[in-house]
Amino acid sequence: MSESSERVYEELTPRTMDAVLQFLEGASFDCEREAYECEAVGEITPEHMQRSIMLPYEIALTERSKKVVLTTGKNRSIPTTANFIVRRDTSRLSLHTHHIGLGQETTTPSFSDIYLTDFASPRTPLILAHRLGLTVYRRPILLDPSTLKPVRSDIRDTLLLWGEENNIDIFSFGGKNLRSPHDLTPNEKFSLERKFAAEANLIVEDGEWEDTQRIQGIMDYINLRRNKNS
């Protein structure tokens, strides 16, 4: 049992990714209150990742003692258990999915994903799996228009200032005449996230499922054969 509100069912016997997915595809549980965790052994393939985005909740892959660990999340968020958070921020792998149930446009890291980059170790590759493929992303890099040099600031402050420029109260703090994220349509929100990703040089590497060479390069991160910056 974790210290979060989620009840975590940890599979003590390592399974292949195929076996883990087969179990999850047939399992019924409340993803908002319960989470499943298992060490995944053997090769993880692009087909496994495509199956993972078909599940009705997000999943995450992290690394523990040179092994990949799969943890299920909630419908609209990654897991929140204490052990997972440590691995998410410091291990050799931090991947999560945007499942197809979220809509056609969820192919960019969300504002929540972007905020969490502030906590990630420099050695941890950040990867998003979505309906179009795999995306490697990083901490935002906004440039000062007068000097074209990176603006160094807290990620939250960066998002707040960018939100003000785009008339959106990203964290729903209130107190200013800005639009609340709750007033946006899903497509409006996704469009803003894509706009920020482009302006903040967020995307390091993008591979569509059909681009086997590029996808394989990102899969090497997932299978722990490739280190960040290699």
Image (spheres, rainbow, N blue to C red):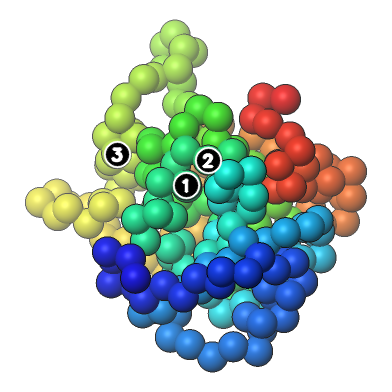
Question: How many angstroms separate mark 2 from mark 3 (CA)?
Answer: 23 Å
Q: Is residue 216 left or right of residue 82?
A: right
Q: Report x, y in % for residue 134.
A: 70, 52
Task: From the image, tell me which residue sits under label 3.
Answer: 156
Residue pictured at 55% horizontal, 59% vertical: 60
Task: From the image, tell me which residue sits under label 1.
Answer: 87
Residue pictured at 81% horizontal, 56% vertical: 43
Q: Is residue 102 above or below residue 28?
A: above
Q: Report x, y in % for residue 158.
A: 33, 33
1 or 3: mark nearer the eye: 1
Residue pictured at 22% horizontal, 56% vertical: 172
SS state under label 2: loop
| Residue at the outermost top position | 147
2 or 3: mark nearer the eye: 2
SS state under label 1: helix
| Residue at the outermost left position | 175
Q: Report x, y in % for residue 92.
A: 59, 39
- Amino acid type of disc 3? Arg
Q: Is residue 16 above or below residue 139?
A: below
Residue pictured at 43% horizontal, 86% vertical: 30
Nearer to us in this view, 57 or 42: 42
Task: From the image, tell me which residue sits under label 2.
Answer: 91
SS state under label 3: helix
Nearer to us in this view, 119 or 195: 119
Q: Is residue 57 above or below residue 191?
A: below
Mark earlier in primary sequence (1, 3):
1
On residue 126, the disc is none
Residue 83 in view: yes
